[in-house]
Image: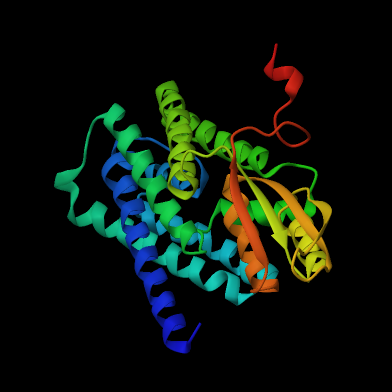
Amino acid sequence: MTYVEKITKKGTDYFLITVGSLLYAIGTSIFNDPNNIAPGGLTGAAIVLNRIFPIGTGTWFMVMNIPILFLAIYKFGIRFTISTVYATVTNSIFTDIIARYYGQYVVKDVILGVIFGSALVALGIGITFKCHATTGGTDVIIKVLRQKYPHIKTGVLFLLIDIFVIMFAGFVLKDIKVVLYSLLGVMITSYVIDFVLYGRDGAKLIYIISDKTDIITARLLEELDVGATHMFGQGAYSGEDKKVILCAIKKRLSPLAEDIVREEDPDAFMIVTSASEIFGEGYKSYFDERI
């Protein structure tokens, strides 16, 4: 990739992150916040805290992210964090601007709020993820916790944090409906993010043929906490023996696995295909599915 192509790609990524941040802010300020929907994570916490100390939901989101972003820089380096910082700042600015100057467009309907608010927030997150950035907040916290507690699955940690935030919202606002609508919002957000990133596929099956299989395998095991199997093949033309990596992976992790292969061996041969169902450790239990 030439220097001009790299600059063009980087500019495109930041433009898309800006669009994603705008969608995220619209979902929060026009739909979620006015209807007391706290959709988990730092956004939900910011909405609740703004009810106690009304300085702006976007401002609260930024304030809470500051120590988290410093933690991300300390743990993962500035290159990992710089796009996340940009996404966090633009999210916060857009959220407060929309809430302050476009209040006439607020939708005061809980059902519409939870559906469209959650969908727009998820669409913004999905676009941001596609540009290899995150929206900060719980994404960084989960990544740090996974390093310390690798036996606890990522999905479990996300769920625990979201439940805590939602219960906190119910306690502060003293309304059980807030809890129920917020739980519905979390489910909608999760589904739409998966749909934006990976379509309707259930999982991915990746075959990797490379001269650097050991390095790639080590990174897959350590960074993504996924299993991998080495198969042995032989090049039909060269006659050389080759190690082939077979990796069944959850769809949300597939782009990260592809990035690892691209970074370690740009000349690797990689096949990514859909797997509608995976049974075994870390996935479905065959027995439980038949009860």
Residue 53 versus residue 164 in the image, above or below: below
- The quarter holding residue 108 reads top left
Establish if 289 lies above or below 232.
above
> In terms of depth relative to the viewer, which is nearer, 37 or 16?
16
Residue 39 or residue 126, whichever sits in front: 126
Image height of 36 relative to 27, above or below: above
Query: Relative to residue 109, is residue 78 drawn left or right?
Result: right
**Does the rendering let one see residue 78?**
yes
Say which residue appears at 46% left-offset and 43% top-offset: 199
In percent of width and height, residue 138 lies at 57, 51
Q: Which of 233 and 57 is in front in this view?
A: 233
Q: Position of residue 17 (x, y in %)?
A: 39, 64
The x and y percentages for residue 230 are 83, 54
Q: Dividing the picture into quarters, in which one does residue 184 lie?
A: top left
Q: Is residue 246 left or right of residue 123?
A: right
Q: Which residue does the image show at 57% across and 57% down from the upper left?
A: 255
In which quadrant will I find the C terminus?
top right
User: Relative to 234, is 118 on the left or the right?
Assistant: left
Residue at the front extreme?
237
Camera-side residue: 154 or 162?
Answer: 154
Compared with residue 202, is residue 26 higher up or lower down, i.e. above or below?
A: below
- Residue 113 placement (x, y as % from top left): 30, 34
Give the colour scheme shown.
rainbow
